[in-house]
Image (tube, rainbow, N blue to C red):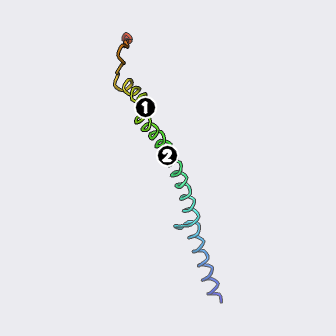
Amino acid sequence: MRKLTWTLLVLLIVLQVNLWVGEGGVRGNQQLAQLTEQQREENRQLAERNRLLEAEVVDLKQGLEAIEERARTEMGMIREGETFYQVIEPAQD
């Protein structure tokens, strides 16, 4: 009977250690929950970025305003009849 008690006690200790520290235990589940939350936040940010890019693509396909804005800012283009002024500040020595 004494041997059985000790065997069951050792088995209980081993199972408790596995439950709290082992793979799939409490600590592992907490880490998994944290990783899941981080991934959800990253997915939310990427979904927002995709939404903005999709809106820009639709705007580029349908409207000339976005194309004109891009040409002005990225390529330095101006309309016919417009005058472009460039202000150059003197170098400070």
Split into 4 quadrants, where in the image is the N terminus? bottom right
Q: Residues within 10 Å of mark 1 (few under 14, many from 20)?
A: few
Indicate the amino acid at tag 2: Ala
Residue corresponding to mark 2: 47
Q: Which mark is residue 63?
A: 1
Q: Return the residue found at the far front.
A: 62
Q: Position of residue 47 (x, y in %)?
A: 49, 46
Q: Position of residue 12 (x, y in %)?
A: 61, 77
Horizontally, is 61 left or right of 17 in the view? Answer: left
Secondary structure state at the residue bearing disc 2: helix
- Image position of 39 with respect to 7: above or below: above
- Image position of 71 with respect to 28: above or below: above
Which is nearer the N-term, disc 2 or disc 1?
A: 2
Horizontally, is 2 left or right of 83 in the view? Answer: right
Q: Nearer the viewer, residue 58 or 9?
A: 58
Indicate the amino acid at tag 1: Gly
Horizontally, is 69 left or right of 1 in the view? Answer: left
Q: Which mark is residue 16?
A: none
In three-dimensional space, the C-alpha distance between marks 2 and 1, rounded to whole angstroms, equals 24 Å
Residue lying at 56% horizontally and 70% vertically, measured from the top left: 18
Looking at the rendered image, the disc whose residue lies closer to the viewer, 2 or 1, is: 1
- Image position of 48 with respect to 67: above or below: below
Q: Residues within 10 Å of mark 2 (few under 14, many from 20)?
A: few
Q: Nearer the viewer, residue 45 or 31?
A: 45
Q: Position of residue 81 (x, y in %)?
A: 36, 13
Count of marks overlaid on the render = 2
Split into 4 quadrants, where in the image is the C terminus? top left
- Which quadrant of the view contains residue 63? top left
Q: Nearer the viewer, residue 11 or 73?
A: 73
